[in-house]
Amino acid sequence: MAMAHSFSVCLKCYPWSLPHPSTLNRSPSSLSSSSQLCFSSSPQQHQHQQLLPPDFTSKQLLDTLRRQNDESSALRIFEWASKQPNFAPTSSIYHELLRKLAKVGSFESMTALLHHMRRAACPLDKGTFFILIDSYADFDLHHEILGLIPLMETQFGVTPDTHFYNSLLNLLVEANKLKLVETAHSQMLSRGIKPDVTTFNVLIKALCRAHQIRPAILMMEEMPSHALSPDEMTFTTIMQGYIEEGDIPGALRVKDQMVECGCSCTSVTVNVLINGFCKEGRIEEALSFVQEMANDGFRPDQFTFNSLVNGLCRAGHVKQALEVMDLMLQEGFDPDIYTYNSLISGLCKLGEVKEAVEILNQMVSRDCSPNTVTYNTLISTLCKENQVREATELARVLTSKGILPDACTFNSLIQGLCLTSKHDLAMELFEEMKSKGCQPDEFTYNMLIDSHCSEGRIREALSLLKEMELNGCARNAVIYNTLIDGLCKNKRIEEAEEIFDQMELQGISRNSVTYNTLIDGLCQSRRVEEASQLMDQMIMEGLQPDKFTYNSLLTYFCRNGDIKKAADIVQNMTSSGCEPDIVTYGTLIGGLCRAGRVEVASRLLRTIQMKGMVLTPQAYNPVIQALFKRKRTKEAMRFFREMTEKGDPPDAISYKIVFRGLCNGGGPIGEAVDFVVEMTERGFIPEFSSFVLLAEGLCALSMEDTLIKLVDMVMVKAKLSDSEVSMIKGFLKIRKFHDALATLGGILDSRKPNKAYRYRLR
């Protein structure tokens, strides 16, 4: 609520404790000085003579009042004018003053003005009181409104009629105050005021909004008992109710009933049904319905075309939507902001950002000004496509056109910067966001806290949490879960436990993600007993442990070689109704292999195959690696081939294990050569240390030509530059294989600094 301006002319001060409508019951003489229109001298009084001529008319006074930016200046002018001999107050002048007071919620001042209006013998009507009623609604004082009606009648002699109650009922329906609608309707009937068709239509709208379609139909069927017939609005409102419930057949039945009752369909009804088809994604039916209605004389209008464009775009048929827009132009309708925003959104969902920008340029060239929604759609998509620079430029365009960026704009840009690891720039934009008066929300803080945690900046993340608290920004489980995860990953488990406890103190419900994150952190810190206790607490709080909970404990026991306890975890998991997944079995297979029980791991692999699960590399890789270590190369390769044929495709680790096994296993060198060809064709670069072993073997067997071909293949797959390729080929040409491999290894090493390819030729 904006703070009212205090002024000495009409009000000594504005009362900001919102009064009960009973203040209307007091006579002007009993009103406090703070609510009376007490006119006193003012230093600005002489300025009003410059605004109005001495012989001003009521219209000139009204125009002058309308030009005032605040209620205090308007009342000062009114004070000056009321003292002039030619002053003739009109309802329009009082209404203008009431509206200005209504904007700031000065209800007692409005009361005083109503009494002033009555003393001036200026007629008060229902429209006068609706200004007061609207103001109560604007300040969410709907429960006080009904108390105004008896006072309006007894103190000011204004009797409510059917039209008045219809407006009041509609105001309450639009505010979704459905209980008050029922009360107001009962009050209307108790006063003997007869409802008309509009009354029933408003009540039916209220029922439909409350998802009470059947009572709405019964109310429509009640209308003839009041000598009233349903009109198009009645039927259309019920149709809209069915559509909101996703029941298009029900809406069509009402349409047929409407025609049977002799009530013809207008464009409003047809458009409601077309929009319903489009919202449900039933585009073909929408187009067929348009054609059917067109045969009956229906002419599509702006709303029709926009509904079709939006429906087609939401269904991914942007090309057809563009064709509808062309037809729209042919029919003489200009595409509006809704049309263009639908097209831009549709293109962005398809990843066609360039085409979306072309539509933006087209709308500007046709004098249709983009709004914040237009720009935010494009900015969000550009950020998701890692085109943060382009998104930032578009945001600058937005600002240059006088469209202020909102929280959605800043959040998209901040998210884009975080995803591209530009954390410092994200924080700069965050500070700019606040400096421009745009309040960060939970989404903003969550992205930045997650970004800080991923960079190990825990102090900064905790500082943002504190800032949220100071700014009154709601903190939810997602924010705390992000912090707990970041603390666990940075080995600050004690602080994670403190945040976990803080959630309870703040009244924020801890969910499965909260517990699973901390349980996993405790397991990683080898505090498995406490992790087990936390799982028990989780169950006591009514949360069922899931596969993530059990897999964390399972991973701990498998890494520590405690296969018995690991098997117990899987057994408990199954008995609790939580079906183990491929991650569970893969973890257990890895544990068995590390414990030297490769035969048991192989049998488990076969067991889960029989369950119909698609095996992943995580399940196969430990078995293949264990077999290679035992020089059981043929069995290892048989499992690898089985994975390529029956399971998920091998991953980079699979190829690394097999290639290293073939190079270290002393098997046929030709098999290792063939495998290099196979893996490079699949898009994987061989592990360089193993490749060096293969190179040494090829050189020892005088198979240098084969080595040269393999190096060429690796260079192509690694996308080396022309200069890099020329350098390596130069060494190969003069048979300096050591230098060629050293250069290739150095280049690959520089591309992956965390994974060095250093080696020594023996």
Image (tube, rainbow, N blue to C red):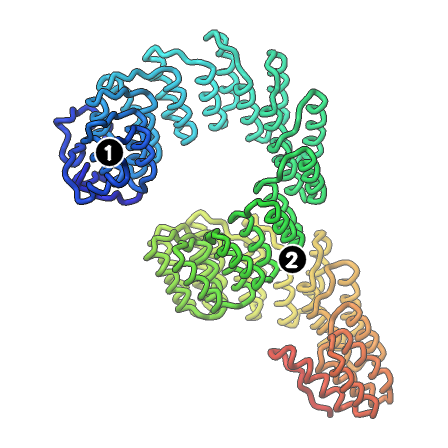
Compared with residue 317, is residue 391 higher up or lower down, i.e. above or below? below
* Quarter holding residue 739: bottom right
Dot 1 alpha-carbon crowd within 10 angstroms: few under 14, some 14 to 19, many 20 or more: few
Residue tagged by mark 1? 54
Whether residue 630 can be seen here: no
Residue closest to the eye, 460 or 667: 460
Is label 1 in a helix, a strand or a loop? loop
| Residue 318 x %, y % | 69, 44
Compared with residue 67, is residue 353 higher up or lower down, i.e. above or below? below
Tell me what residue is drawn at x 74 percent, y 84 percent: 692
Cα–Cα gap, marks 2 and 1: 91 Å
Tell me what residue is drawn at x 16 percent, y 36 percent: 34
Tell me what residue is drawn at x 61 percent, y 48 percent: 365
Residue tagged by mark 2? 582
* Quarter holding residue 722: bottom right
Residue 564 appears left or right of 4: right
Residue 1 appears left or right of 606: left
Dot 2 alpha-carbon crowd within 10 angstroms: few under 14, some 14 to 19, many 20 or more: some
| Residue 131 x %, y % | 33, 28
In the image, what residue type sits under mark 2?
A: Ile
**Circle nearer the N terminus (2, 1):** 1
Is label 2 in a helix, a strand or a loop? helix
Compared with residue 625, is residue 50 higher up or lower down, i.e. above or below? above
Question: Quick one: quadrant of the C terminus?
Answer: bottom right
Mark 2 or 1, closer to the camera: 1
Residue closest to the eye, 557 or 285: 285
Whether residue 366 can be seen here: yes
